[in-house]
Amino acid sequence: MLFVDMIFVMAVALSFIPILTGYCAYNYGRSFWLWFALGWVLPLASFFLLTALILREQLDPGRRLLADARLILRDAAQAKAAAQSPE
């Protein structure tokens, strides 16, 4: 029984970086499954590469403004759809 517990703990520990990489990628509009797979193949390299891509996107004022504009348009479309739906 102890062996099964050890294998379970090792699987959870080894899947922490791929899950974290996939989650971060998904939150920034990238493919969860692609980055999850990269997290399994190249755990630390994929995490640092994704971090560099996110930082580049966040530090570029043009990209940041574009992301903000997309959020505003999405919220406006949702508000319009909610106003048009019959109750």
Image: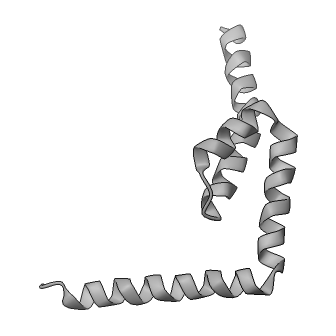
Percent x, y of residue 41: 77, 31
Residue 32 versus residue 66 in the image, above or below: above
In the picture, which quadrant includes the C terminus? bottom left
Q: In the image, 13: left or right of 86?
A: right
- State which quadrant residue 35 falls in: top right
**Snapshot colouring:** one colour
Task: Give the total number of marks visible in the rendering.
Answer: 0
- Name which residue lies at 82% across and 35% down: 42
- Name which residue lies at 68% across and 88% down: 65
- Name which residue lies at 59% across and 51% down: 31
- State which quadrant residue 8 falls in: top right
Q: In the image, 82: left or right of 4?
A: left
Percent x, y of residue 47: 81, 48
Q: In the image, 29: left or right of 42?
A: left
- Name which residue lies at 77% across and 65% down: 54
Percent x, y of residue 30: 62, 57
In the picture, which quadrant includes the N terminus? top right
- Please name whichever residue, 17 or 29, is drawn nearer the observer in this view of the structure: 29
Residue 61 versus residue 22 in the image, above or below: below
Outermost residue, front side: 62
- Please name whichever residue, 38 or 14, is drawn nearer the observer in this view of the structure: 38
Percent x, y of residue 9: 72, 25
